[in-house]
Amino acid sequence: MHKAESLVSYIYYGFNQSTLFLRIDPKTSFNDFPPDTTFSINIAKPFAFRVNVAYRDGLAQAGLFEKKNGEWEKIKDITEAAMQDILEIAIPFKDIKAKAEDELNLFITAYRGNEEIERCPWRGNISVTVPTPDFEATMWY
């Protein structure tokens, strides 16, 4: 099996008390991707959610989906998203039912049409712990 060169250079994440922030740096501008390329931010834990992001007409179009009874159901549009040279998105913890000290397990998938062409990380997940109300105080000794 041959593994093609990755579409993604780097994935960065951060958070504040209420929101998870993600940044995805592609190897080339999203302008250069075929129009049927989409990205999914897959949250596997504590609950199954997915954010689908597409670059259409120069804008990021992002929607939040929750897995219910084995089917993906759209919950809402994500309006805090931008995509051109990089993808940046803000996902409120309350929208994915995450509470303080919950561990989030997530990964990114890229699709061309309905075919998955890449997963980041290739194995495993990115793990993020939802901050507690005193998180900033405990990080600044």
Image: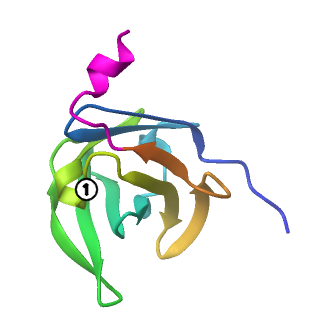
Check residue 132 for magenta coloring.
Answer: yes
Q: Nearer the viewer, residue 86 or 71?
A: 71
Rendered position, 71 above or below 105:
below
Image quarter hosting the C terminus: top left
Picture quarter containing residue 98? bottom left
Q: Nearer the viewer, residue 27 or 105?
A: 105
Q: Please name the residue shown 47% across and 56% down the image.
A: 105
Q: Nearer the viewer, residue 133 or 21?
A: 133
In the image, is 64 to the left or to the right of 32? Answer: left
Viewer can see residue 18: yes
Instruction: Name the spot of residue 75 as percent of width and height, x first.
Output: 16, 69
Image quarter hosting the N terminus: bottom right
Viewer can see residue 57: no
Instruction: Name the spot of residue 114 as percent of width and height, x first.
Output: 48, 76
Dot 1 alpha-carbon crowd within 10 angstroms: few under 14, some 14 to 19, many 20 or more: many
Going by the numbered disc 1, the residue's amino acid type is: Ala
The residue to which callout 1 is attached is 62
Q: Please name the residue shown 36% across and 89% down the image.
A: 70
Instruction: Name the spot of residue 57 as percent of width and height, x first.
Output: 25, 50
Extent of the magenta region: 130-141
In the image, is 57 to the left or to the right of 44? Answer: left
